Image (cartoon, rainbow, N blue to C red):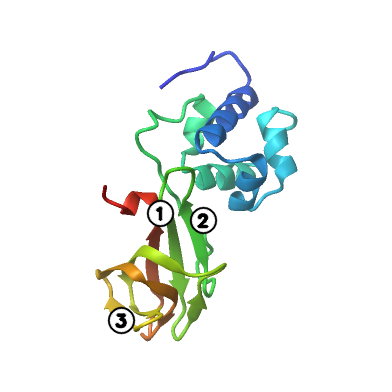
Amino acid sequence: MERRDSHAPVGTHVAASLRAVRRDRGLSQAELARLAGVTASAISQAERAAGGPSLETLLRISAALGVTLDALVRGGHGSGRYRVGRRDDVPGQEGGRALLLAGAGAPVVELVRLAPSGHAALDGGADRDVLIAVAAGLVQVVLDDGAPVLRAGDVLHVDGAVVTGWRNVGECEALLFRIAGPALHAD
């Protein structure tokens, strides 16, 4: 990991690291802003070290990029051989969804929270090649040709059918991971 001049201001380390990681992920400032839930102006200012972003903003940005805040401050972001996805959802938020990982060439990993009897449809369409892994609860996955029910620890690989949504059929909160993207295809 590259270390920067330790005498440079922290804002300079963060600005350079943020810009490098964003570019490595193939994200525009606007895309990163959307993923982090901040304005594109906040990303631009942070990358130019023009004013200090708040700690909360930095935490949102680092979570969206899958790097630690420490890595941004120190001026390095790892070897590029791994990425960390951190959830930033709010406990108790009904139907909450947190995008854990996304980017060029990477799978999309999303954490979905479903309240008891809660349900959700996929935003912007349907998935055709996806893994659904249930971490807690009892979840019915809604497909175009069926609706299997998964319990905690079960994983469903959908290849050919269309996933349109899911519903919590249990009495407790359910958590599931939706994993989709190029990494699922074995060549």
Q: Residue under label 1, please give it.
A: 181
Could you tell me residue 74's position as x and y percent? 50, 25
Q: Residues within 10 Å of mark 1 (few under 14, many from 20)?
A: some
The image quadrant of residue 12 is: top right
Q: Given contact means CB atoms under 8 Å apart, are the residues at marks 1 and 2 in contact?
A: no
Cα separation, mark 3 vs mark 1, equals 22 Å
What is the secondary structure assignment of the residue under circle 1? loop
Could you tell me residue 11's position as x and y percent? 64, 26
**Amino acid type indicated by mark 1:** Gly
Question: Toward the viewer: 179 or 174?
Answer: 179
Q: For the residues carrying marks 1 and 2, which lies nearer the camera in this image?
A: 1
**Amino acid type indicated by mark 3:** Pro
Taking the spot 71% from the left edge, 48% from the top edge, the residue there is 39
Taking the spot 26% from the left edge, 47% from the top edge, the residue there is 187
**Any mark on residue 83, and which?**
none
The answer to whether residue 75 is above or below residue 162 is above
Q: Residue under label 2, please give it.
A: 88
Q: Residues within 10 Å of mark 3 (few under 14, many from 20)?
A: few
In this picture, residue 172 sits left or right of residue 69:
left
**Comes first in the chain, label 1 or label 2:** 2
The answer to whether residue 27 is above or below residue 47 is below
In this picture, residue 76 sits left or right of residue 59:
left
**Comes first in the chain, label 3 or label 2:** 2
What is the secondary structure assignment of the residue under circle 3? loop
Question: Toward the viewer: 21 or 53?
Answer: 21
What is the secondary structure assignment of the residue under circle 2? loop
Q: Residues within 10 Å of mark 2 (few under 14, many from 20)?
A: some
Instruction: State whether residue 153 appears in this view.
Output: yes
**Amino acid type indicated by mark 2:** Asp
Q: Residue under label 3, please give it.
A: 148
